[in-house]
Image (cartoon, rainbow, N blue to C red):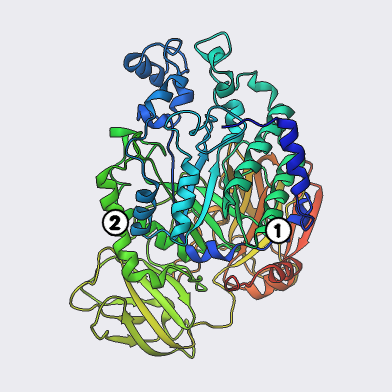
Amino acid sequence: MKRVLFGVMAASAGLTVAAEYKAEWSDLNRYPQAEWISKAKFGLYWHWNYNSIAGFNGWYGRNMYNGPDGYVFKYHKEKHGDPAAFGYKDFAPLFTAEKFSAKQWVDDAERIGAKFIVGMAVHHDGFDLYDSSYTPWNSVDKPPHIDVIGELAKEARKKGFKFGATSHLAWNWTYFSSFMYPDKYDAKKAPELYNIHDPEKGPSEAWVKEWYARTTELIDKYKLDFLWFDFGTMDKGFSDQYTAKLTAHYYNKSVEWGKTVALATKVGFENRKSQVHDVEHGKFGYIRYPQWMSDSTLNKGWFYMGAEEDPKQITGEFWLYQLIDIVSKNGTLLLNIGPKADGSWKEEWKQELFRMGDWLKLNGEAVYGTKPWHRYGEGPTHDGDAEHYNLGRNLTKDDVRFTRKENALYATVCGWRGEPINIRSLGRKELPGLEISTISMLGSPDRIKWELKDDALSVSFPEKPPCEYAYVFKIEGKGLFPERAPEYLPVHVEPPKEKVAALRISLPGDHQQLSVAEVVAVGRSDWAKINRVPEAEITMSSCETDPMLAADLNMNGHPNMHSVARSETETDPWMLVTLPEPMNILDLEILGGMEHWDEFAKEGKIEALDAAGKVIHSWRVKECLEEQKAETEYLGLSG
């Protein structure tokens, strides 16, 4: 591909930026969230590059240089020779992709039930799978000599799918340099690929400029509907000058294109109100507004890892249950598959996912285009704490998950039952004034028997199951959608810029009981956003229940299954959450418990304390909720 001079390209890109959005986080938060991704619910993408050739380790390109004691180093030396003689660059001629077909990938994704398509544009190794102007290490100039992103975009859009890309490039600065220096192995022979330097110094401005140029070219060339960033942008070299500038470029391009795009990130971007919050191979334990996404992987290593896979996770049943749970909490699942180096997928993986697709073809009405109910579900299984690699378990026949669309409520029971299921969330006591007109099971012609009781709605199953895995009751009538708060009161707080050592939550006044379902204070680990509250010390002015329940998995207010920290009824009750260390909080949410939520909404107070116990910032819950209401519809995103 013809090369362009860096300075010329950067200058040209600057001239095309539209004026609608400034490179300032406060202004970028004006950008509307993309409703299409919230409606789509399920997307598919792929990890595929030189790592797929070895089929042994997800970070093979990096770990093969981890010295003589490293297990990947030993494997590589045995299979391919010493890295000095056969390095990562030498996999290039082997990446022939003779079975790759973008059409087949997109056709199979459609058969699985995905509603948007995403391609991995570049991983940490810096090999671009598109027609890049900035590095010779791309899939057009090197084998397989295919514009992978271009081909996928073309086939996806033929079918009317939105198309996006993931970029893992930011961490390329550290990927190889963590283990390898210029005087070792084969780095000097391919400096454009290995990007070798002293990793302790952090990304140079020249490198961050290259990252910006390569990423804006990716955006512009393929007119991306969706862009997802992995970690790396939290390093000090990635200042707002570049991350905010790139976000403004993307948003302004979308205005020029006449469409709303979706940006998803983990760290390094501060426009949290306009982007899609991402959790890697994990999920929330509660209904979260605004929308969020779980990017998760079918196979263990993200890239193809041969026989190293976990068979328990590679089933249509497991991933369908994850999708059902995620959607009930206002999330979207972006599922990764690791193809073989030749571009084919393991046939058994494909067949398992096709079973998931069969279910969605019959029951998709309860998934696509839905919104959460005021309660995500009931039953024994409650997983998810917004931490990466904490996806959770399979659901059971005693678990129910709820979604809503127009005038219908969908209750998905996650297993076949010979006996009726009693849905306590739909009893008369829970929903006074409920009048049910019809109940049907999607895919079944049989008339469904049911009985509305004070403590539950009892629903019988038909004689034969219409599908595998999970069974959807469509419920219609009056009083299904009461005008009331959800089972907890989520209060999103804009965190202070200063380091926070503790949080104080209080409810001023006489005869008050403070109820806190969960506290979420997201801090930064080495490379991901993690809720640090489970590591905190939590105390209360008085204790009716264990204060540490505020750090437990939220039970979402299920009858008789509360997981809520409560004070006794007293004057000015309070809770103190002492974090494991003073930290910069990236995201802060307080979930008021279902008891006395009205008082907490009107009178509650939240304070951030420094290490000396001094209040550095305070918020009134009422003001926070008023701001939230202005930003999004509380019981569902508009449209």
Residue 598, picture quadrant: bottom right
Residue type at numbered disc 1: Val
Q: Nearer the viewer, residue 117 or 146?
A: 146
> In x, y percent, where is residue 248?
73, 51
Residue 419, picture quadrant: bottom left
**Who's the residue at 45% across and 21% down the image?**
88
| Count of numbered badges drawn on the protein | 2
Instruction: Find numbered disc 1 in the image and state the secondary structure of the residue it sits on.
Output: strand
> In x, y percent, where is residue 524?
63, 41
Residue corresponding to mark 1: 493
> In x, y percent, where is residue 346?
28, 42
Q: Distance between the residues labelled 1 and 2?
A: 42 Å
Crowding at mark 2 (Cα within 10 Å: few <14, some 14-19, many 20+): many
In this view, which residue lies farthest toward the top?
A: 183
User: In which quadrant of the rendered image does the N terminus lie?
Assistant: top right
Residue type at numbered disc 2: Phe
In the rendered view, would you say 38 is above or below 18? Answer: below
Q: Nearer the viewer, residue 290 or 160?
A: 160
User: In which quadrant of the rendered image does the C terminus lie?
Assistant: bottom right
Query: Left or right: 280 with respect to 456?
Result: right
**Residue 247 visible at all:** yes
| Disc on res. 598 | none
| Disc on res. 354 | 2
* Mark sitting earlier along the chain (1/2): 2
**Who's the residue at 29% across and 56% down the image?**
354
**Who's the residue at 75% across and 50% down the image?**
17
Query: Left or right: 245 with respect to 365?
Result: right
Instruction: Find numbered disc 2 in the image and state the secondary structure of the residue it sits on.
Output: helix
**Residue 386 visible at all:** no
> In x, y percent, where is residue 212?
68, 38
Query: Left or right: 156 with respect to 627?
Result: left
